[in-house]
Amino acid sequence: MNVPRYWRSERTRYGLVGEICRSCGKPIFPPRDVCPHCTDEGQDVHPFGGKGQVYSFSTVYDAPAGYTEYQPYTVALIKLDEGPLVTAQLTDVDNEAVHIGMPVEMVTRKIKEEGENGLIIYGYKFRPVLESKSSRPDRF
Ligand SMILES: [Zn+2]
């Protein structure tokens, strides 16, 4: 087994770890062998902050096997504060309330269960950034 690659994919699954290209300085996510911006091979591991905004989204009503317990759910393309776009499921959110530009943050959640005996797969999802109560209008 290629140990560094294994380590890298595990890190990617549990946290938002990307890379910064040593040649062009651009952030890369997910990590890959060749920079998508300049095609150079040198990258440094870089943990991203896990915050961003909804860039586009679509709600899934007819989920594939293994994901049905969450349907309907919303999958969003999220533009990270660092720049890269990430596709992830949204969680802790009313599907009706999702909108473009909504601030979101990464959380580690159960992604799916495989089979009857449930091999549980964890990974990252995004949830809305909780706004402070003072920004919510009181109805008095
Ligand atoms: Zn580059």
Image (cartoon, rainbow, N blue to C red):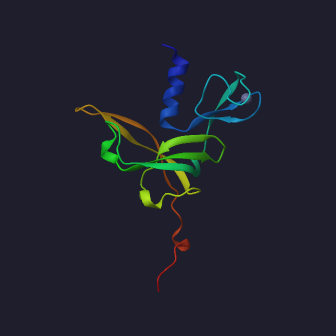
Q: Can you name the residue that lies furthest to the right here?
A: 24
Return the x and y of residue 7 as percentages of the image width and height.
51, 24
Q: Can you name the residue that lies furthest to the front here?
A: 62
Q: Can you name the residue that lies furthest to the bottom here?
A: 140
Asked if residue 50 shows in the view, the reply is: no
Rendered residue at 56%/41% (across/down): 86
Rendered residue at 57%/56% (across/down): 100
Quadrant of the image occupied by residue 5: top right
In front of the other: 60 or 23: 60
Numbered-mark total: 0
Using the image, determine if residue 10 lies above or below residue 85. Answer: above
Rendered residue at 63%/22% (across/down): 33
Return the x and y of residue 19 as percentages of the image width and height.
64, 32
Q: Is residue 6 left or right of residue 31?
A: left
Rendered residue at 49%/80% (across/down): 138
Q: Is residue 105 left or right of residue 23?
A: left
In front of the other: 31 or 65: 65
Return the x and y of residue 77 as percentages of the image width and height.
55, 45
Using the image, determine if residue 17 lies above or below residue 77. Answer: above
Quadrant of the image occupied by residue 25: top right
Q: Is residue 69 left or right of residue 103?
A: left
In front of the other: 14 or 127: 127
Q: Can you name the residue that lies furthest to the left here?
A: 116
Asked if residue 37 shows in the view, the reply is: yes
Q: Quadrant of ligand 1?
A: top right
